[in-house]
Amino acid sequence: MYTPSGKIDIKLPFLGYQSVSNALAASALAFSLHIPLKQIKDGLLSTPTLPGRLESIKLSINKILINDTYNSNVASMISAIKVLEKMPGYKILVVSDMAELGEKSILYHKMIGNIANLSKIDSILTIGKNSYEISKICKNSIHFLEKEKLKQSLKETILKEDQTTVLIKGSRNTKMEQIVEYLIKE
């Protein structure tokens, strides 16, 4: 980070480009209040990740779970796809419906399907009525009608691959945190 009084290197402990914007805004405010750069850096590095918001969880050696189940909309879904693309290993995106999109819901789910289909994600698992639209577009996807079957398939894939990153995303009403809890227990 460059300021009029110097520069300081900071490697943020957060995922996603929006975290950089947030950190810069907080840093600018702190700098304007004459807080020393070292203290700004320490504050940023000690900021906890919010549960369910691109929260990185190490399941085991070479197995990473990204819990992004707090909520889902078009912008956050696109951001999640970009984050997952940059992660190591076999990449699995698990998504449910994006809620509260109104009459254009199907269109938005198809748009996400097109973006996911062009991404560097290895496998896409969907659940939910509207998320089926994502699955229909993506060549590397499976749609599930039941969470239990999705959880079992996901677990098998994670165990099969040497290195895996799984990102789980969905609107609050789809309760995708149940899948996160299942993977943490297993």
Image (cartoon, rainbow, N blue to C red):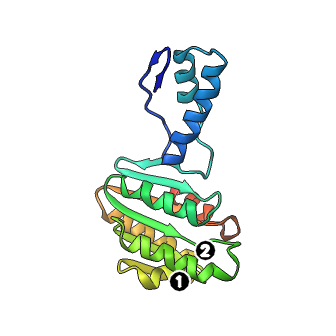
Q: Where is residue 105 in the image (x, y as percent from the top left)?
A: 63, 79
Residue in the picture at 44% in, 54% down: 83
**Residue 56: x, y in percent?**
49, 47
Q: Dot 1: few (<14), some (14–19), or many (≥20) neighbours within 10 Å?
A: many
Left of 62 or right of it: where is 16? right
Outermost residue on the front side: it is 4
The relative height of residue 137 versus residue 181 in the rendered view (above or below) is below
Q: In this view, does 80 lie above or below 27?
A: below
Q: Residue at x 35, y 71 (%)?
A: 118
> Is residue 186 something that shows in the picture?
no
Element assignment for label 2: loop
Residue assigned mark 2 = 97
What's the distance in space between the residues labelled 1 and 2, CA to CA? 9 Å
Q: Is residue 20 above or below residue 158?
A: above
Asked if residue 34 is positioned above or below residue 97 in the image, the reply reads: above
Amino acid carrying mark 1 in the image? Tyr
Query: Which residue is under mark 1?
Result: 132
The quadrant in which residue 27 appears is: top right
**Amino acid type of the residue tagged 2 in the rendering:** Asp
**Label 1 vs 2, first from the N-terminus:** 2
Position of 117 compared to 111: left or right? left
Can the viewer see residue 75 in this picture?
A: yes
